[in-house]
Amino acid sequence: MKTILKSLLAITVLSVVFTSCGNGGSKKGAQGALSGSAAEKVYVAPGEHDEFYAFVSGGFSGQLAVYGLPSGRLFKVIPVFSVDAEKAYGFNEETKPMLNTSHGFIPWDDSHHPDISQTAGELDGRWVFINGNNTPRIAKIDLTTFETTEIIEIPNSAGNHSSSFVTENTEYVVAGTRFSVPYPQRDMPIEEYKGNFKGALSFISVDPEDGAMDLKFQIMMPGFNYDLSHPGRGKSHGWFFFTTYNTEEANSLLEVNASQNDKDFIAAINWKKIEEYVNNGGGTKAPTRYAHNVYNETTHTATSTIKEEVVVVDPSEVPGAIYFLPTPKSPHGCDVDPSGEYIIGSGKLAAELTAHSFTKMLAAIEGEKFDGEAYGIPILKYDEILAGAVKQPGLGPLHTEFDGQGNAYTTFFISSEVVKWKLGTWEVVDRKPTYYSVGHLMIPGGNSRKPFGKYVLAMNKITKDRYLPTGPEVTQSAQLYDITGEKMELLLDFPTIGEPHYAAGCPADLLKPNSKKIFKLEENEHEYAVKSEAEAKVVRDGNEVHIYMTMIRSHFAPDNIEGIQVGDKVYFHVTNLEQDYDVPHGISMIGANTSELLIMPGQTETFVWEPKQVGVWPFYCTDFCSALHQEMQGYVRVSPKGSSVPITYTLDGDAVDAE
Amino acid sequence: MKKSKLLMLIGTLLLLGLFVFPLWNITLEAPQYPEPIGMDIYITKIADMNPHDIKNINLMNHYVGMKDIPEHMIEFDIFPIVIGFMIVLGLLIAFKANYKWYLFWFILMTVLGIAGMYDFYLWEYDYGHNLSDKAAIKFTNADGSPLAYQPPLFGTKTILNFVAHSYPRTGAYFLFVGMVLTLVAFFIGKKEHQA
């Protein structure tokens, strides 16, 4: 009898499970049915490598995180706009200049849109660029060292949001202002916004050889909000497209006052035409102030230069270079398909997704199919340029990427979903929920001529109940979908640093062979480098003391230093003499008002210590380097100010010397 | 030109390869070294198999009290002279002497080769046994005697976390083939003489 009851119960339970699976309506059931093969698809066996790199911006963390896909494993957080005590970024003497601006040293920013450099419209894996939103800056990260090597501040801008996207051959990385500001910046009533505020669109040239950035020109556009942008590619190479909102030019309660116009614009900029104008001496050289910070990989040291001039271009000076494409309701994302024909505007308050045709745009310009103008810039007729619209696709469209197979994938913030649709027919093919409120999405190469359409990564704004709770502040997350089939398949959720705002991805093989293993000691040209223990020394210069120190498994040279006095400013210039892969050493001094140093093989870094108390104070290696790591330490004797104890320095009782 | 003479000539000249290619190689594998580290031994020097390998071998070995791999050894002066002498001698024999001298050259080269290997063994022995008293890490065998770190003369051997491979390289093959050719030259020369 009992057995029968048990069997009946089992059948009942099973039928419930099957029913819910069969319906596919329940969220949990649908995931359960997928989980088996999904786990296999994201499993990267121990010691194996991921297929793709994903560079995911950290949003308000100011950094850029490197993940592997499909595993979602975090490999490195590259410090870009925020200090990082772990890596001494912004703390050591070498990298402090990287965070200098016209407003002085700024330890933080809000990093948004990474974009990998391109050649002929395809990812070339040389650099990744990223924008700092708050104090407008563009950074360049070298993809051989995965370190930030250049930061350029953008003057006349505020809320540097429609940035940092590259043109087809990385001729330019572009930075557009989200907030318009008075130009020139001045003390004036805010309510006189209209007509007096300008929106600067900045074109930063990138040297094809060494990647050096230079602010070539700024276009002073009407005082709208320039939200996002993307370059033309293929047939539309030479053009750049920026979405705008607040064409109402409201300056208060924008959530209402900037949402009144039925259509805002996508600004189409023929940058080649403007470049030609500037190359021929056009534009105005205007006074300004902005910082240009460059990290030199040979001296291992950054320098910051304040520049005082920028070329500005008034759109009216270059007729025929700029047009407005009317686009419904405060468009946010501005994405160009791999062929360069379609410009997708995501009207975030609109009921449909708008696709403009580049071919039709050129014809409309040719035929002067204008619908008035704004501040002298012709507005093209909406119906003349429209390629099509995706009807009722979802609520709150934000961003679109492409798989290279004729499909587009758009995120919908309000309805929390990714929607797959077809270019040309504008029909919706599939939709999958995200958890929750997705912002950007990323297909490796999805904004180039050659996407790698295997996965899409959706980056969410909130997670609520998706992970173990950690108090009021919970983790942020990204979600990976397989897009190789007709229908998308959710494979993985993984937590991210900061806010995963946007990402750039590329095949691992593009970067792996170029990743640097060590810095060559013989190429180290740091001002205070010492390349052998024999050269190590301590030099007093007034109340400054410079310690030229070396580190190698498992000791410092020198490791006993005497003759330091209270009130001295002691510079530890420490060179890692190792030339072996993955043997960094760290160093930290008790009471130093700064971070540790984490020094890669062949590199020199400097920290400053200002001893405040008499005594004998230890320093030690902070990165577990070797079997005798715990023995890697030293002492500094600090005497009272004016003491007669001379400067001496030894290793194993002997003055530092060749062995 | 007689076949034997030609072979003696070629055999001798193959020794020139020793001035270009490494004679021997010792490679060390360990879990921490997914790319093994090693040294190429030439008659004139010991060189990195990959950049910085010797520096890294020295760094490993200093913990157990082993000396650095010498940048210069007296052998680096002697070996090129000996090989140079044997090439000149071989050429003289090829052009001026009869086939019996071919065998003489071969035997002399064999003796010198064995002496060279013995010398290499002595250096390896000293390198692996003559450890600093102040070594940070002192391992012992089961019987309490200090553990030695001598790499094998020929073959593969496990030393603590390392697997050491010691094998001839291109230079040694040039020498070996050259010597075989001179021996063949002797036998062919003998046949030619009898004919």
Image (tube, helix red, strand yellow):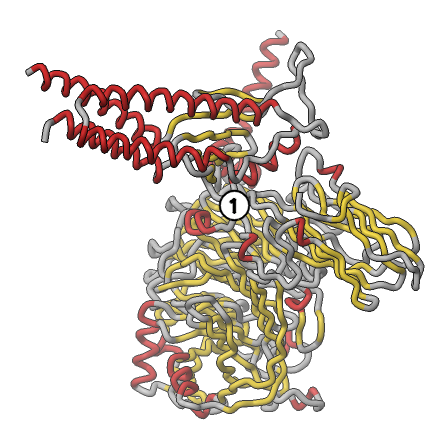
Asked which quadrant contains residue A149, the reply is bottom right
- Residue A337 in view in this figure: yes
Q: Where is residue A502 in the image (x, y as percent from the top left)?
A: 55, 59
What residue is pinned by disc 1?
A68
Q: From the viewer's perspective, is A633 left or right of A48?
A: right
Q: Number of marks in the image?
A: 1
Q: Farthest residue to the top: give it.
A: A1
Chain letter of mark 1 equals: A
In this rendered view, identify the residue nearer to me: A612 or A511.
A612
Q: Between A229 and A437, which is closer to the camera in this rendering? A: A229
Q: Residue at x 53, y 69 (%)?
A: A163
Dot 1 falls on a residue whose secondary structure is strand
The vertical placement of A47 against A562, above or below, is above
Q: Nearer the viewer, residue A339 or A77?
A: A77
Q: In which quarter of the image is the N terminus of chain A?
A: top right
Residue A412 seen by the camera: no
Q: Report the front residue among A288 and B81.
A: B81
Residue at 44%, 57% in the rendered image:
A125
Residue B62 spot, x, y in % from top left: 64, 33
Within-10-Å neighbours for mark 1: few <14, some 14–19, many 20+: many
Name the quarter where the C terminus of chain A is drawn: top right
Side of B165 where A99 appears, left or right? right
From the viewer's perspective, is residue A527 above or below residue A19?
below
Q: Is residue A620 left or right of residue A341?
A: right
Instruction: Name the amino acid type tagged 1.
Output: Gly
Residue sitting at x 55%, y 81% = A200
Instruction: Identify whether A658 is placed above or below B147.
Output: below
x, y (%) of residue B157? 50, 20
Which residue appears farthest toward the left when viewing the image? B195
Q: Which residue is drawn at 37% across and 30% down?
A: B169
Residue B143 in the image, given as x and y percentages of width and height = 67, 10
